[in-house]
Image: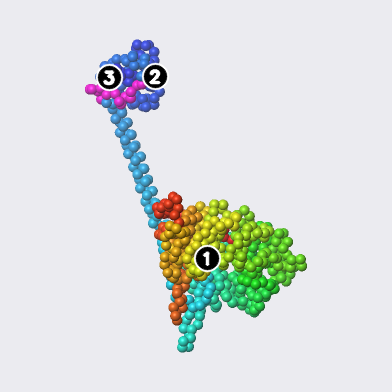
Amino acid sequence: MATVLSRALKLPGKKSPDLGEYDPLTQADSDESEDDLVLNLQQKNGGVKNGKSPLGEAPEPDSDAEVAGAAKPHLSEVTTEGYPSEPLGGLEQKATSSLVSYIRTSVFLLTLVISMILVLLCAFLIPCPPRDLHSTWSRHLGSQAGGDLSPLELADVNGDGLRDVLLSFVTSRNGSAAGSSRSTANLVCLSGMNGSTLWSSPLPEEAQDITCLDLMPGSVAEIICLVTGTRKMLSAFNATSGKAIWTLNPNYLSNGTLAAPVVLLPDLDEDHVRDLVVLAIGETQPDLCFLLVSGRTGNPIGRPVKYNIVGVGNLIGPQVYVTANGAVYILFGFGNIQAVALRDIFVQAQNRDSSPPSLQIEEPEWEKRRSINLSELIDVYSDGVELLQMVKAPDYNCSNLLVTTRQGLVLLRGQNLTPYWTLSLQGLRSQPTPGYFTDDQTLDFLLQIQDGLGMKKMMVIDGDSGSIAWSYSAPCHMKDAPTTSAVTSDQKSVFLFWAEGLSPASPNSDALMGAEPPSLHHLYLLHPAFPSIFLDLTNTSGTVTASEVGINDLWKDAFYVTRTTGPISEGHPAPLVVSKVSLRWALMEGQMVQLKETTPKIGRGELRRFLSRIKFVDSPYQI
């Protein structure tokens, strides 16, 4: 031990009495900053000087250790009985280091406490966005007196981030005369949060459609709701206050009545507000009249433009179609589809030969379909058309046309109006619901087909090939049960439809028979990842007349709003009920209905884990 201490106490640069030259070990030690600090402190305090201990005893050199080049132990680690463990300077340095460490720790803890206080203050003082805590609510709006139409629209009218519910209905009120009653129409806005009434406005007639939009894209203008009546009413309402902004003078429709909802157009009068077109029909079917209307004032843009067409069947359109080149056409017809360029309507309405540059664009493939006499009407499709809807094309900056006919379904290419595919089906009367079911990122379609008495066949059509991707028959006595879909963040869609209660599948049959009386209908959800499972979300004993799906962008949730009328009792009108249910909440609370056995069997826990990760986003295929 004395030998080790002797080597450790050698001063750097001190000549060895034995070798007559600098000691290499002590010279190496002199390069270490820590030892320099210790030795300097020792020299200042007289702890070690000239290689001798404080007691004046010269240490013996450890020649063997020096030759072997063994590492020199730290001074503080060398202790000998009767000697102090470290010099006085080391004690002072240790005290100084402890004080610095204490100060640093105190500053760190003080900073941490201040940061936590600031976080808590921000959490309590900064208002958080409202959360849709009322995931489910139901509102009874009294009795509906007649009226077969059930307009329903969703829009955030109060700026709280949650879409609210707008609807119109007809109520019956007792008149002054004994036993007399009169019907009044109302436009009502319900809070998306809890179903309370935000505002209500009377209407001069029953409404057939409510469309809420921004007439000035890119601006901070308030949302406008356009309400189309069943006869001559067209009004624009401020969605926040419920006050009418303007109303179209019914005299401009002469003897006609509004045949369809108002349609949005580009800005025609260059006042930076998008304009509108309405289609009016006279007493005789061939008399169709287009009227251009200013979106800012509600005044006509020119005179009415009449077309005489011949057709048999449902009124189609009007719908606005914009080609990939930017040409604008209006689609309409009776049991067929015809198109007229918006440029032609504008020129006749203004009674002049020129039109705005935006309307002078033509689509060559569409223009080829004009008749030989260069008629303004373009033939698009003419084989028993029942319904028409736009479908966003995946690879083009335009839309395809999905045509529902009495014979089946046809998808027309938007570029040249040629069939993409054709599917023969009988009994298809409801509008197909678009959504993503397959993995090719092409829109597919959910169909409802009458499949015998009290049965409906649910069917998903592959949008790329027109083939049947999935089908199932379920009991349903509801005549026109609406279907809808919602898109998830992984570019899939959940499909929602109504059917009667389903019992567990029998071992020898794929069909599920109704487990309840036909008066009770259930809302079922189909996810493409589990095609052999339905999720039973909710049920109602009323008749569902309208439904809409909205997205809560903040919480990546979707909600389902239904408009139902209860059973009509003798002498009493049907009660009107509006309900809302959060889809993410309903997914976790819903009951699983196994359509058929699968291998391996899908467990409830696996399904719940999958459903808990679902997030909903706005539909990317909105036209």
Residue closer to the observer: 90 or 329? 329
Residue closer to the observer: 17 or 350? 350
Quarter containing the N terminus: top left
Write down the region rendered in magenta: 71-84
Task: Identify residue for label 1.
Answer: 451
Residue 293 can be seen, yes or no: no
The residue lying at 72 percent from left, 67 percent from top is: 376
Outermost residue, right side: 373
Q: Please rate how many residues cluster around mark 3, counting C-alpha atoms within 10 Å: few if below 14, some from 14 to 19, many from 20.
A: few
Residue 261: which numbered mark, if any? none
Q: Please rate how many residues cluster around mark 2, counting C-alpha atoms within 10 Å: few if below 14, some from 14 to 19, many from 20.
A: some
Task: Identify residue for label 3.
Answer: 1
Mark closer to the observer (1, 3): 1
The vertical placement of 41 against 332, above or below, is above
Residue 27: which numbered mark, if any? 2
Query: Who comes first in sequence, dot 1 or dot 3?
Result: 3
Q: Which image quadrant for residue 99?
A: top left
Q: For the residues marked 3 and 2, what is the alpha-carbon distance in whole angstroms?
A: 22 Å
Mark closer to the observer (3, 2): 3
Q: For the residues marked 1 and 3, what is the alpha-carbon distance in whole angstroms?
A: 102 Å
Q: Please rate how many residues cluster around mark 1, counting C-alpha atoms within 10 Å: few if below 14, some from 14 to 19, many from 20.
A: some
